Image (cartoon, rainbow, N blue to C red):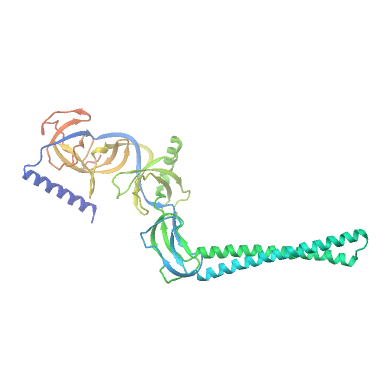
Amino acid sequence: MSPSFLYKFSIMTILLIAQSARAQGGPPPAKVYLETAKLETLADARAVTGEIRSRHTTDLASQVAGLALEVLIEEGDQVQQGQPVAKLDAHRAQLEYQRAQAQLLSDQSLIEQRQADLDQARRDLARLEELDARGSANPAQLDQAQTLVASRNAQLAQARADHAIAQSNLALAEKELSDMTITAPFAGTVISKHAEMGQWIDRGDSICTIVSMTDLEARIDVPQSLLPALELANDNAGTKPNIEIILPSIPDPMNATVHAVVPQADALSRLFPVRLFVDDPNHQLRPGMSLTAMVPTGTQADLLTVSKDAILRNAAGEYVYYNNNGAAALAPITRLFSVGSRVVIRSPMIRPGVQVVIEGNERMYPTQPMTIQGIDGTPQSKEPGNADQQPAAESGSEG
């Protein structure tokens, strides 16, 4: 369904409501406050496209091979860091772990035995050395005792080395056993599932894809002609420049901060990827959302602005009501970017000097009479139709 069809449908609906209201006598004239659309000389900005991306996306893979006994997630599930997502058959790994434990105990016992043999050999050598000091020792026995001490030392060293290997094997067996339960590396959402119960999983096979929903950023593609303006804004501000981004699914624009320019342009488009950090306190963003970002051009331009309070939204897009000789008229607008409390717009019907409704427009309908309470902050007291004659906006002229 095209935006032009939605717009025409919405306008027809509003007009039918207005005709019904008039046929039934209608509500009283709307009490409104107006503000003038202005042409202001401002720093210009150019729209570039991009998307929301997660800075943490993983194809969660198995570190071991085994039969999948349980796959505990489905697409769309929320997972927390460390939460099990799949369990493999751990029976063989459990046996390997128990064998490694037994081997470690055996090696520990061997160390104790080798230490006892060494202690005995040292005591025998000490007695022979004492006899030798008195001149009554057999030199051959003394040599044998010294050799035995050296041998016992070597055997103890070997036993300790075997014990260290057993400790390592036990740690590996414990890790293998632990890896039979595959857990989420971070909190996020499962966007695809790649394994099922009863499936054989090889080492490195993907179980699912998880995307972080809280650590998001915007990626935009910027022409090289706009990069100097971004760098200049950074130098002047002393901080990363702010960029306004507009998403079709979110009513209000959002603020983003330039984080980094990827220093490698696309070979075909010659566009440079730029990473933006987005301020999203209400967690409205989702990976894959398309967006439009308003990037400064570094030039000044005469731009049409209206108050933020004048802008309304329906299924077809954004619009404003304006004063058409004391009656409400509707004009579609395209929002470009915000400047303080005002918004730079483009519209085929609004031109500088047109008075737009900034208060009292919530339930307004086209052709509804207006009682103007104030214009540009100046109080008014005029009846409908007796207000300053605001000329109708000329169709086809652009601000």
Q: Nearer the viewer, residue 116 or 40?
A: 116
In the displayed structure, would residue 340 be above or below residue 139?
Answer: above
**Residue 289: % across, % down:** 34, 52
Q: Residue furthest right?
A: 135
Q: Is 103 left, or right, of 74 in this rendering?
A: right
The one nearer the camera, 218 or 221, is 218
- At a point 57% along the width and 64% down the height, the residue shown is 172
Tell me residue 389's x, y (percent): 14, 32
Q: Position of residue 313 (x, y in %)?
A: 23, 45
Q: Position of residue 210 (x, y in %)?
A: 41, 58
211 up-or-down from 330: above or below: below
Q: Quadrant of residue 226?
A: top left
Position of residue 278 relative to residue 97, above or below, is above
Question: The C terminus appears in which quarter of the rendering?
Answer: top left
Quarter holding the N terminus is bottom left
Depth check: 278 or 98 in front? 98
Residue 357 visible in the shown view: no
Identify the residue shown where x is 12% and y is 48%: 16
Residue 134 position by quadrant: bottom right
Seen in the picture, residue 194 relative to 186 is either above or below; the reply is below
Q: Is residue 45 visible?
A: yes
Direction from residue 88 to residue 351 in the image, left or right:
left
Q: Which residue does the image show at 62% across and 62% down from the upper left?
A: 167
- Compared across the picture, whether 169 is left or right of 330 comes to right
